[in-house]
């Protein structure tokens, strides 16, 4: 299996198929927030928008926080990133175990 470490090594079509498979799963279908989070980070990664992976930008774009959002006092992005990582791991341990491309979001960041 290929792991998306850098989008330059995997064709965008393969990334698109990988994301579509994950997002079509039952777990992600039940969680619009995780759907939006995963889609956001993958789209930004493929587009090369590295400056948009900070907690502040994710909070505004994904979690509908206003400009007064302070990542130092509000942990929503970190908490939801942990949840997203668990959901991805469960997907690849179950229905996605044969998928040719695996999407991971390493701890300590939000870039897939």
Image: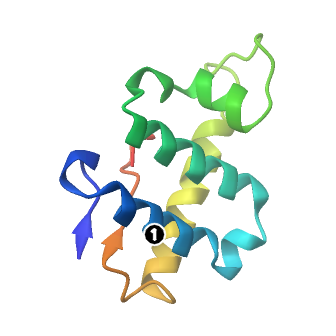
Which quadrant would residue 57 be assigned to in this image?
A: top right
Residue 13 position (above or below residue 82): below
Residue 55 position (above or below residue 23): above
Q: Is residue 108 visible?
A: no
Residue beneath the point at 45% across and 40% down: 110
Q: Is residue 86 visible?
A: yes
Residue projecting furthest to the front: 13
Residue projecting furthest to the left: 9
How is the model colour-coded? rainbow
Residue beneath the point at 58% across and 43% down: 40
Residue beneath the point at 52% across and 78% down: 91
Give the camera-side residue of 69 and 73. Answer: 69
Give the camera-side residue of 38 and 106. Answer: 38
Label 1: few (<14), some (14–19) or many (≥20) C-alpha neighbours in 10 Å: some
Give the camera-side residue of 102 and 88. Answer: 102
Horizontal and vertical percent position of residue 76: 69, 37
The mark tally for this picture is 1
Horizontal and vertical percent position of residue 42: 47, 48
Residue beneath the point at 23% across and 77% down: 1
Q: Is residue 31 left or right of residue 5?
A: right
Horizontal and vertical percent position of residue 3: 26, 63
Residue tagged 1? 17
Horizontal and vertical percent position of residue 11: 28, 58
Secondary structure at numbered mark 1:
helix
Which quadrant would residue 4 be assigned to in this image?
A: bottom left
């Amino acid at each position: 299996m290929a792991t998306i470490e850098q989008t330059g090594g995997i064709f965008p079509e393969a990334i698109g198929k990988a994301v579509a498979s994950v997002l079509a799963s039952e777990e992600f279908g039940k969680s619009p927030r995780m759907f939006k989070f995963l889609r956001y980070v993958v789209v930004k990664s493929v587009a090369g928008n590295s400056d948009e992976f900070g907690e502040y930008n994710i909070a505004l774009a994904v979690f509908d926080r206003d400009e007064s959002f302070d990542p130092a006092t509000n942990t929503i992005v970190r908490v939801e990133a942990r949840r997203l990582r668990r959901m991805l791991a469960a997907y690849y341990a179950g229905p996605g175990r044969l998928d040719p491309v695996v999407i991971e979001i390493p701890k300590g960041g939000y870039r897939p």
